[in-house]
DNA sequence: TTTATATATCGAGAATTATCAATATGTTTG
DNA sequence: CAAACATATTGATAATTCTCGATATATAAA
């Protein structure tokens, strides 16, 4: 982890909704409805569910999630027409080590 | 640690200079000149030294440090006319536990 | 008590971020 | 292939943050 990456992560974590998303994704099965198609949360939660829970526009949340993936906080996986998002614990750990 | 505090900390850590300051303060004796008056770094580093190293205006750095103290990232101690700043490891730990 | 030094606060303009509606792209399904 | 659905991107305005010089306050030294 370097200064630039750490700062990008900080930017993602400088907004209440985005911090909240990181928290929600700790326990997807508790914070989101079960998936219709996929019967598990192995790859996280789809954009629509996160967007509805956040209560912001689709474009805003999509941009949030894209940036959170870019800086390594989230991992995005496509399954058909859905994008699933989960926490990237590896990067989170590296970030924590950086600021510790 | 709650969502609001965590977000305030995220805001402080969303700027390269401020993240850098947190890094510098890990090892004051390596990153800053020795104090003229105080012969130790027990309470950290004075505003002027941080300001000079950051290369930004006095008012900007003073505001940075004030906000970083407000959200609990730093501890400020007055010794005469100097304010000394050091990392608040307790809050940092709580923040890390929050996002982990 | 005046002067010098260190830090904090204020006010303002520049730069960045937030947020949305509209639209584009990608994917599945009829 | 056309329609429907999920997500991504674009373009624009509002809101926030950045950053500075100027000024205020606090403390020490002369």
Image: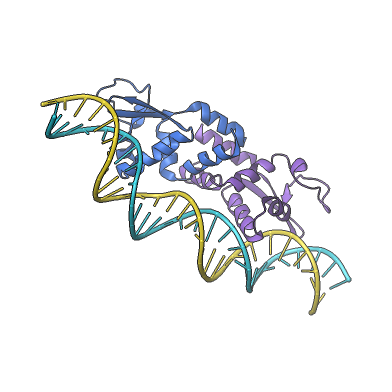
Chain colours: A purple, B blue, C cyan, D yellow
Disc tally is: 0
Q: Residue at x 51, y 35 (%)?
A: A98
Residue C19 vertical position relative to residue A86 in the rendered view, above or below: below
Occupied quadrant, residue B27: top left
Depth check, front residue: A16 or A5: A16
Depth check, front residue: A84 or D29: D29
Q: Position of residue B83 (x, y in %)?
A: 33, 29
Q: Position of residue A89 (x, y in %)?
A: 64, 39
Q: Position of residue B69 (x, y in %)?
A: 44, 33
Q: Residue at x 50, y 43 (%)?
A: A6
Residue B35 vertical position relative to residue A36 in the rendered view, above or below: above
Q: Is residue A89 left or right of residue C13?
A: right
Depth check, front residue: A80 or B96: B96
Occupied quadrant, residue A22: top right
Q: Position of residue A13 (x, y in %)?
A: 56, 44
Occupied quadrant, residue C3: top left
Q: Is residue B79 left or right of residue A43?
A: left
Q: Residue at x 49, y 35 (%)?
A: B71
Residue A1 vertical position relative to residue B77 in the rendered view, above or below: below
């Amino acid at each position: 982890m370097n200064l630039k990456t750490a700062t990008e992560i900080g930017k993602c974590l400088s907004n209440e909704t985005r911090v909240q998303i990181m928290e929600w994704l700790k326990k997807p099965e508790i914070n989101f409805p079960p998936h219709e198609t996929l019967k598990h949360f192995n790859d996280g939660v789809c954009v629509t569910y996160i967007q509805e829970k956040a209560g912001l526009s689709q474009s805003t949340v999509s941009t949030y999630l894209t940036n959170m993936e870019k800086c390594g906080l989230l991992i995005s996986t496509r399954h058909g027409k859905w994008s699933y998002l989960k926490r990237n614990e590896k990067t989170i750990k590296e970030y924590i080590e950086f600021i510790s």
